[in-house]
Amino acid sequence: MPAWTLEAAGVHLRRTLDSGQAFRWRWETRNGGPDVATGIVGSHRLRVTQDARGVHLLAPGTPTARDALARYLTLPSPDATRSGGDAPGLHRIEARLAADAVLARVLPRTHGIALLVQDPWEVLISFIVSQNNNIPKITRSIEGLARALGAPLGDGAYAFPSPARLAASHPATLRACHLGYRAPYVREAARRVAEGRLDLDRLRRIPEAEAREALRELPGIGDKVADCVLLFALGHVTTFPVDVWVRRAVERLYFGGRPRPLREIRAFARDRFGPLAGYAQQHLFVYARTHLRNPRGRDTVAVTAPAGASGRARARPGRSRA
DNA sequence: GGGCAGGTGTAAT
DNA sequence: ATTACACCTGCC
């Protein structure tokens, strides 16, 4: 009962936390009640759930934990970008997205995805680890880093390690986290941040393109990882990271399944979605993960079919992620 | 067991 | 300026 509640209008908590932005949330299913998620945000181990009234923070009940959750779930706005002003809210954002005929058919299956406001340092390392990798293994590597180098938070939870701790870590420690060839990338990023050669907070305040360039200076960071950091942590919500899933979705839903060069997909997204590109990307990603798992499938009809034919889900059962 | 997974760097045109 | 290939590792 001592839950503190956040209205979070229009947010689908589970979809949001499972939408590939964050790697530190675990769900437990409870029969008889709503599912509960436990996640590490900064130095807090948060337990949250959602019902019709909103998102409830079950524990801990401290003011700092509340602040951390509130900030985490504050929608980065494409309009008010860095000048303050009114945030549009998720309903309004999705209404605007639905002006796109394809997204209008995607949204019924993906609505409620919020962009989180995460710690840039954690996101940087997490997405370096994500390259040419899969989600379960990324999750284990991040968990391993936290366990080995992060501050203990109680109940077997550990904060994400600081740049200094990671920079000073022993190679064997990183090896035990199964980073593979990404280990040197992680180490170098940690060094640069720890030594102040890369100022992540500064990247919030400069134009997206400049921030991207700065991130790409780091070894092991290309457009995709840089874009993820810009979008998921630095408030540059017009960014459109293109991974294999988003690429698949765009090719399938907008280009009749024809392969397109990466640069074309990026340009297409800019033109088509403008300031809402970041949100559009999340919906396309989640849609692809749940409905386009078969690389050669023909499930484009589910979304691109004429108006009368929509409605019934055409998706195969498919695996859902752990 | 070769191929693939939320890419990137490098060496070839 | 594009295109191919290798790469840690775990899983099928």
Image: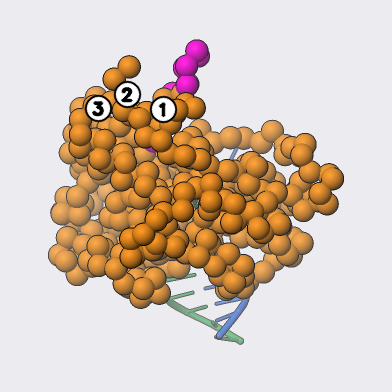
Chain colours: A orange, B green, C blue
The residue that label 1 is drawn on is: A49
Q: Chain of mark 3?
A: A
Earlier residue among tags 1 and 2: 2
**Predominant SS of the magenta segment:** loop
Residue A166 locus on image (x, y percent) = 21, 52
Earlier residue among tags 1 and 3: 1
The residue that label 2 is drawn on is: A3
Using a 10 Å C-alpha cutoff, classify the residue at mark 1 as few (fewer than 14 neighbours), some (14 to 19) or many (20 or more).
many
Q: Nearer the viewer, residue A200 or A62?
A: A62
Earlier residue among tags 2 and 3: 2
Task: Measure the C-alpha gap from mark 2 to mark 3.
Answer: 9 Å
Verify whether residue A277 appears in magenta: no
Task: Measure the C-alpha gap from mark 1 to mark 3.
Answer: 13 Å
- Give the residue type that dot 2 points to: Ala
Between label 2 and label 3, give the one nearer the viewer.
2
Boundaries of the magenta span: A25-34
Q: Residue at x 51, y 45 (%)?
A: A113
Tally of marks: 3
| Numbered circle sitting on residue A60 | 3
Residue A17 locus on image (x, y percent) = 44, 39
Pointers 2 and 3 within a single chain? yes
